[in-house]
């Protein structure tokens, strides 16, 4: 649709209902890739230690990692073929 130079993360692109369903459907390999990335992020989250000198920095990093995990989990949750 767009080259990387033209991509705007905040632009909504019109899609038909059929296109939305196809776009939200992941094949098994894509699901495994997302799951492995979530696992990698979870490992990073667990390795963020307590930093007594700059505790806010560690908490910001934990929040950032949690946000990434939540965003990836939401991709799996919107898959119309994913069972509840």
Image: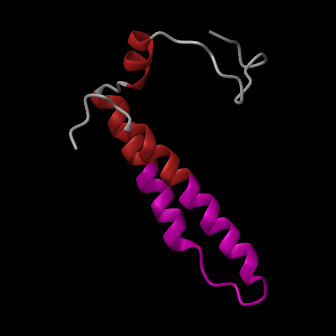
The image shows residue 69, relative to residue 27, as above or below, that is below
Residue located at (72% from left, 19% from top)? 4
Q: Quadrant of the C terminus?
A: top left
Q: Nearer the viewer, residue 4 or 79?
A: 79
In which image quadrant can residue 50 be found? bottom right
On the image, the x and y values in percent for residue 75 come to 44, 38
> Would residue 37 be found to the left or right of residue 68 on screen?
left
Residue 37: say if magenta.
Answer: no
Q: Nearer the viewer, residue 11 or 59?
A: 11
On the image, the x and y values in percent for residue 9 come to 70, 29
Residue 46: say if magenta.
Answer: yes
In which image quadrant can residue 39 be found? bottom left
Q: Nearer the viewer, residue 75 or 62?
A: 75
On the image, the x and y values in percent for residue 38 come to 44, 51
Q: How has the structure been colored for display?
A: secondary structure
Residue located at (71% from left, 23% from top)? 11
The extreme left residue here reads 83
Residue located at (74% from left, 78% from top)? 56
Residue located at (30% from left, 28% from top)? 80
User: Count the marks: how many?
Assistant: 0
The image shows residue 8, relative to residue 6, as above or below, that is below
On the image, the x and y values in percent for residue 45 come to 53, 67
Q: Nearer the viewer, residue 41 or 2?
A: 2
Q: Quadrant of the N terminus?
A: top right
> Would residue 10 be found to the left or right of residue 30 on screen?
right
Segment colored magenta: 38-67
Task: Considering the whole magenta stretch, tell me its main secondary structure.
Answer: helix
């Amino acid at each position: 649709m767009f080259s990387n130079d033209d991509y705007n993360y905040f632009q909504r692109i019109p899609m038909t209902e059929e296109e939305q369903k196809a776009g939200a459907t992941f094949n098994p390999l894509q699901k495994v890739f997302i799951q492995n990335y979530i696992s990698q992020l979870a490992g990073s989250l667990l390795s963020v230690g307590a930093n007594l000198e700059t505790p806010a920095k560690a908490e910001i990093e934990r929040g950032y990692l949690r946000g990434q995990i939540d965003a990836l989990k939401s991709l799996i949750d919107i898959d119309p073929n994913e069972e509840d």
